[in-house]
Image (cartoon, coloured by chain):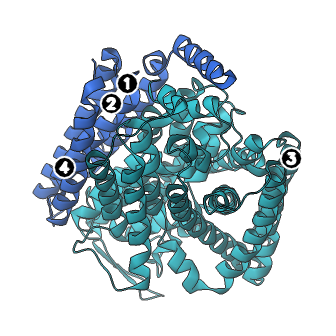
Amino acid sequence: MSTGTIALILSFSIAMVVVSFLIGIWAKKKATSAQAYFGATGMFGPVAVGLSSMAGIASAFAIVGVPGIIYSTGNPMTFWMLSGAAFAMSYIILGKRMRAMAEVAPISSLGDVCDVRFNNNKLIKACMSIIICLGCVGYLAAQISAGSALIANLVNIKPIVAGLIIFGLLTVYTALSGEVGGLLSQAFQGAIMVFAGLVLIIAFFAVTGGFGGVLEAVAANPTVTGATNGVTKEFNPNLLGAWGTYPGGISLTWMLIPILGCVGQPQVLTRMYAVKNPKDLPKAGLVTAITHTIVGFLAVCAAYGAMYLVATGKIEPLAKADTAIYAFADYLGIWAQLLVYAAVLAAALSSASMFLTSSATLLSKDLTSAVGIKIAPEKQIGVTRVFMFILGAIAIVVSIYSSEMVALLGTFGWGTLVSGTFPVFVVGLLWKRCNETGTLVGVAYSLIFNILPLVTSFKYPSTLPAYFITSAIAVALTVIVSLITKKPELNKETELVMDL
Amino acid sequence: MNIKNKETPIWVLIAILWVVIIFLGTKGHFVIGMCLGVLLMFLHMLLGVAKNGVVSKKFLFYPMIIWAVLWLVSFILSGYWGTMFDGVMPSFTILGFHPSFAPTVFLYWLGGQLTLNLGLYLLPDEWLSDAEWKEFCDKAHALKNK
């Protein structure tokens, strides 16, 4: 890459971080109450909520890792990336009840919703908070690691320096403005991802002639070996079929868990009470769906674009599949490189700020109250800010210096969050017969079986991912135990919400 | 359609479905598992869209039933063509896509958008009307002020 190109990419990246920082600082004046700071409760319209939801969901992994997975194993991952219908499904399932909770009680975090539904049950809240926190910290570490490496490689500086500058600034503005600044800056970063996606999708069709062109090229050249790097790429005939080269159970998992599991993601759940009016949720759903469609399709097009370039001999087979999007952008030229780097950085920043706020809120507010530590309401924002600074600093250092820890935390992701939130929010807010005992058994099972594989050699006797099985069993246990134990007496607030 | 007294049987069915889907996925019957997954998602939406146990028939037909049919057809066609062209290049394409992948693009992805996202946008009152929200807010404020 030429010096001029690097300078341009770097300038654009710096500009994006600075604008995000300024948005965060500006938003500080709006974060005046606990509800605003922690939840941006009832503050935003459908465009901001829709864009920020998409940006929170589409992490750096979606832009970089997904094209690599599709390049090497084919289409199962497209079930995940083309899951735009998940947002409307989430709002249909839980949107109005989640938003309604904010009318019957002062809701600023997921723990508050749990308190209202389960009569301040501390054990449920503690288990749920730990599970969500594991998932959020895992995501946070992965974003910092990816974003820092991206810039460090570009300008040949140490990753810790890049991490401290980019994510240090992010920590400052997120800590000062809370979820208000987080949501607004994510909306801005989401808009950048959408713009980059649109341009690169058009470029994909211009270069390849469309998906038919890719299929023809791959069929004509099933094996390609690089003349310089010696890497061989085998284009398996199943690669471009629906199930790719993975066992079919992976397609089942990557369809069901992202689609139905979308309703269990904190970045979707918390946005349900961030809208001013629940009637904005259908509009927000449409905004999220359209923008997610563009960003998801970008990942698919980048993978197919790289396949086409390799099959037609325009580039050599990739030594590392994760470089698929960069290889495609490099072929297109400087403007594509600029957009790809901007999109990756925007994705890393938006997801990082989302998960930083969520983790800090869970640790400093929900988990502390669950274990009986009382923090005066007027001091809560200040305490969380301190937590956020500390968590941000630790996450930057650990993410960059401990690749083992990043890998370990990386195992807690989407599926972990599903297993922790479904028993509490989905079963809890849709079924009046769901009681505290059932929910506690469900979340306790999730907590134990998310951690157990890390500390022991435990494995489910199945080829399906463990998070899928844990989520399924947690829901089943919640239902069964609720049924065989005492019928709950719902408080009036919960009854009113569940009848909506 | 009134599901008020059917919520518990629905949840029992949901619990069974989760476990059966895991079993089918483990045993390699993933296409059937995906089809049952559609039923699982449908049941969640049924419970979510219900207003005090009553589901709008209009919303039930479109977007929900049409969505379910599109996705079922998508998975079945992908399974059919996936088996037909397993290990070989396909002898035809559908608008340039591998025949087993085309249903994912047109029915799963675009079909999902045109049913669930567009349906919720076009029929928001069937999910929650202004009058229902106002009535709820009035009750909520009365409860708070007690």
- Looking at the picture, do discs 3 and 4 lie on one chain? no
Mark 4 and mark 1: Cα distance apart in space:
44 Å
**In the image, which is nearer the foreground, mark 3 or mark 4?**
3
Residue depicted at 38% across the width and 46% down the height: A260
Name the amino acid, label 1: Ala
Tag on residue A81?
A: none
Tag on residue B50?
A: 1
Name the amino acid, label 2: Leu
The residue indicated by pointer 2 is: B46
Q: Which chain is blue?
A: B
Mark 1 and mark 2: Cα distance apart in space:
6 Å
Name the amino acid, label 3: Lys
Sequence-wise, the earlier of marks 4 and 2 is 2
Of the pair A112 and A92, the residue shown nearer to us: A112
Locate residue A466 relative to residue A417 in the image: left or right.
left
Does residue A43 lie above or below B17 as drawn? above
Mark 3 and mark 4: Cα distance apart in space:
58 Å
**In the image, which is nearer the foreground, mark 1 or mark 3?**
1
